[in-house]
Image (cartoon, rainbow, N blue to C red):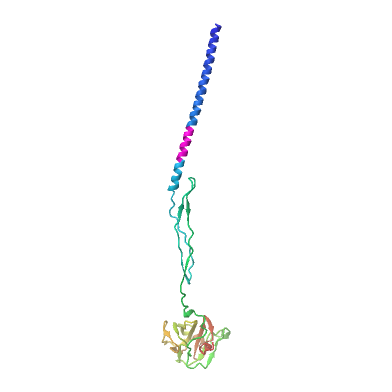
Amino acid sequence: MKKKAFSDNKRSSKGFYAALGISAVMVGTACWFAYDQGNKLSQEFLAKNSISEPERAVDNKVTNVPKVTVTVPYNTTAVIQTATQPAYIEQPHSSGDTPTVVIPEAEMPVMEEITPIDVPNSLNTGITKLENVKLPLADVSEIIEPFSGGELVKSETTGSWQTHNGADIAAEVGSEVYAVSNGEIMSVEDDALWGVTVVLDHHNGFITKYCGLSQDVPVQPGDIVVSGNLIGTVGDTADIESALPAHLHIEITHHDRYIDPVQAFSGEQ
């Protein structure tokens, strides 16, 4: 009876160790299989990445790259030309680098000399006297009211103190008025204060203004006149100086500055 029990125990121990060994073999096999599958997946992943990266580098195209230009301000003495070069793509040196867009610097502007143009006579500030001067009236000996030179004088008509920017030369109504120098008639108008007024631009910085003329003016805007040509006749249309005897009110400016008209047409200016 005891022998049978011992024999049963011995078989039970062998079965236990056999089962333990089988379990160990199965665990080892599972670990090896997992390692082998992981290694294969890693190799496939690396193989895919090593192929697709260069393909992306080759296929990575950059379009609509703007050209670089240099804008140079306009200059009246030179012509500016600029040259540009197209941008290009610098290919990566390794599979992990990103393609670089290279935009070359613009070339230096090319300067081309041009011949300067002559300055128009109307802009010539070097002329300080009227040219080919003629008197505005046949007789300019009597000056009723002289040029005030910017000082305030009392007006006999209005009673107010103001500058007298011209000269009042005594003359009978109907006396002929002449161009003091060559020029172009810029305006003919009937001013509310100064009456019939003619403005003569000499196109050299000098402008002459005749005031208080008669209505029958023989010139019109755009007419070209020379020294001594008839501008009009003395009238009594200047209400602002109606208290004075018949006269011609004449003003001359040089580059928008009032000057003494008597000195200007007598050659003293």
Residue 138 shown in magenta: no
**Looking at the image, residue 185 lies above or below residue 100:** below
Nearer to me, 177 or 104: 104
Q: Quadrant of residue 160?
A: bottom right
Question: Residue at coordinates 47% horizontally, 35% vertically from top-left?
Answer: 41
Residue 43 shown in magenta: yes
Q: Residue 242, position in %: x, y?
A: 50, 88
Question: Residue at coordinates 54% horizontally, 12% vertically from top-left?
Answer: 10
Image quadrant holding the C terminus, namely: bottom right
Question: Residue at coordinates 55% horizontally, 10% vertically from top-left?
Answer: 6
Image quadrant holding the N terminus, namely: top right
> Is residue 15 at least partly visible in the picture?
yes
The stretch of residues the image draws in magenta is: 37-48
Q: Residue 67, position in %: x, y?
A: 45, 58
Q: Residue 144, position in %: x, y?
A: 53, 91
Dominant secondary-structure state across the stretch colored magenta: helix
Nearer to me, 243 or 95: 95
Q: Quadrant of residue 183?
A: bottom left
**Looking at the image, residue 208 lies above or below residue 52:** below
> Is residue 187 at least partly visible in the picture?
no
**Looking at the image, residue 43 lies above or below residue 197:** above
Q: Residue 213, position in %: x, y?
A: 46, 87
